[in-house]
Amino acid sequence: MHNTPNTPPLLAAHGLTFNRNDEPVFGPLDLQVDAGEALLVQGGNGAGKTTLLRVLAGLLPPASGQIQIDGKPAGRRERAQFVSYLSHLPALKGDLDTLENLNFLCGLHGRRARQMPGNALAIVGLAGYEDTLVRQLSAGQKRRLALARIWLSPAPLWLLDEPYANLDLDGINLVNRMISAHLRAGGAALVTTHGAYAAPPVRTRLIELSNHGATA
């Protein structure tokens, strides 16, 4: 799905930089993600991949630069409407079961049309775990439950920080199928990864982050 001349990208950043203790972490960085497209951000540990996603998600302020979502300056309203963020932490409540977690999160963030929490559990391979407390799940199962939360989100832009972490080959294939389906429906995804081995088979832009800057 290509944008028409009058359709802004779902996400765009211009001259984006971030400093920690007055030391540059990344930037200046220009990036763009259109509907129907994935942006793959590669780089080793310390290159700033997680920091970049946190800045784009509004959790950290950039040192300089602009971020636009759907052609508008990225504020709380735009991020709440357009962005769903998967971080290293699962953002789940350990003393609630899997279904309670998804129902709670749908109540906070809304739900994709025609998708239900029980179906999302089945999609990520957790059918039969509806009554299982999250603290009883393995790291891989928690990752799958976090992916179910992303799948249920109505937000068109996914920010996925190392979505393949703690997953076996079947889980990696699951992530790729989810991203492919999301893009076919007109969504977009920004995905960080240590390497391209797990890149989804979709139309993809690539940015390589390093301690010396970024290349596209």
Image: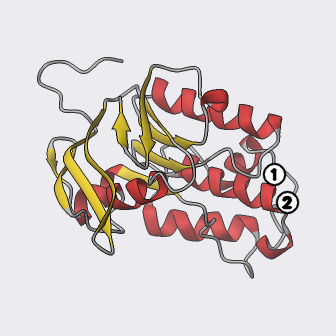
Can see residue 108? Answer: yes
Residue at the image point whose x is 61% and y is 67% from the top: 89
Q: Which residue is mark 2?
A: 129
Front in this rendered view, residue 134 or 44: 44
Front in this rendered view, residue 13 or 195: 195
Residue type at mark 1 is Leu
Circle 1 SS class: loop
- Colour approach in the figure: secondary structure
Residue type at mark 2 is Tyr
Residue 9 x %, y %: 24, 33
Circle 2 SS class: loop
Residue 161 x %, y %: 54, 51
Q: Which residue is mark 1?
A: 126
Residue at the image point whose x is 62% and y is 47% from the top: 163
Can see residue 114? Answer: no
Q: How many residues crowd mark 2 within 10 Å: few (<14), some (14–19), many (20+)?
A: some
Q: Is residue 9 left or right of residue 199?
A: left
Residue at the image point whose x is 44% and y is 44% from the top: 210
Quarter of the figure with the N terminus? top left
Q: Quadrant of residue 207?
A: top left
